[in-house]
Image (spheres, rainbow, N blue to C red):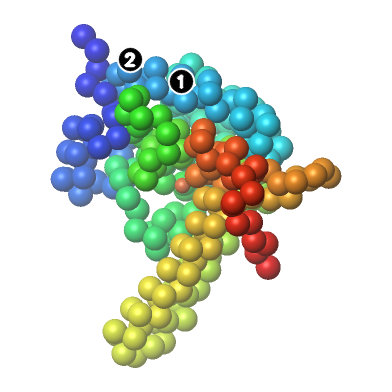
Amino acid sequence: MSAPGLTTTKAPFIEEARSNGELYIQQPYDLYSDENQDTWRRLYARMLPRWEKYAHPRFLDGVRNLALNPDAIPRLEEINKFLEPLSGFRAKAVSGYVPAYLFFDCLRNRDFPTTITIRDGSSLDYLPEPDIFHDVAGHVPMHTDKVFADVLVRFGEVAQSAARMAADISDKAERVRVVESIIKGMARFFWFTIEFGLMKRPGGQGVCVYGSGILSSYGEIEHAVKSPSVQRYPTN
Ligand SMILES: [Fe+2]
């Protein structure tokens, strides 16, 4: 009999973890169904040629360094065997959404909250929820780069500094407002860089992609690089 599956929004294991208030979980690898594995294979096979064409060279180095398997959903413990010696980062399985401050604080500790479910095979294109293809194939290859990884840690340090600075504000409502406002600004910056960033191609013409939201989306990657309708602004 096939395993019950770890399909995004349809995984009883995840529902149960959430209802028990468990955010950090194990990756119950045997629960992936044959269909889940097939979804990974199809996602990977169609993205690979697009990565080779449009991704930042450091991302492609990362894919090689992680030894991602085109044919099987990655085991996070295997990923971490390659990742941790390179940058100190670890992919850490979570049951769902991690609030922004906590997310940044995980990065400060070089833990990357990682979704373990995989999208429904009937809709391979961009979906609003992260899944393991977005988190592991879209984000983690860049985390093998030491400089990039240190920038992620900086996000965490800045969030912590914001909380410390705000601790001196005696009015509680004002304290919360200040921290929330800073974290919101940081989340926006993260969105336009780590999630959806483009970079000038090193030593070449045009731009290449390092943002994970684009790197994990078959339709977006070519559009982001080629379409004249995309607004590409430098971050100063
Ligand atoms: Fe993401």
Viewed as shown, does residue 67 lie left or right of 204?
left
Viewed as shown, does residue 17 lie left or right of 29?
left
Residue that numbered label 2 is attached to: 34
Of 77 and 103, nearer the camera is: 103
Relative to 189, does residue 83 appear above or below in the rendering? above
Q: Which of marks 2 and 1 is nearer the N terminus?
A: 2
Residue at figure coordinates x 33%, y 18% from the top left: 35
Using the numbered discs, state the Cα–Cα distance from disc 2 to disc 1 in whole angstroms: 12 Å
Kind of residue sitting beneath label 1: Arg
Residue at figure coordinates x 64%, y 49% from the top left: 228
Q: At numbered mark 1, what does the secondary structure look like: helix, strand or loop?
A: helix
Relative to 139, does residue 79 appear above or below in the rendering? above
Q: At numbered mark 2, what does the secondary structure look like: helix, strand or loop?
A: helix
Residue 37, given in percent of the width and then of the height, sits at 38, 19
Relative to 190, does residue 218 appear above or below in the rendering? above
Of 52 and 5, nearer the camera is: 52
Can residue 158 be seen here? The reply is yes
Frontmost of labels 2 and 1 is: 1
Farthest-out residue, right? 203
Residue at figure coordinates x 43%, y 23% from the top left: 40
Viewed as shown, does residue 63 lie left or right of 186?
right
Residue that numbered label 1 is attached to: 42
Of 108 and 123, nearer the camera is: 123
| Quadrant holding the C terminus | bottom right
Can residue 140 be seen here? The reply is no
Farthest-out residue, front? 229
Quarter where residue 166 is shown: bottom left
Q: Is mark 2 within 8 Å of ligand 1?
A: no
Crowd band around label 2 with a 10 angstrom C-alpha radius: few (<14), some (14–19), many (20+):
few
| Quadrant holding the N terminus | top left
Residue 119, given in percent of the width and then of the height, sits at 35, 32
Residue 15, given in percent of the width and then of the height, sits at 19, 39
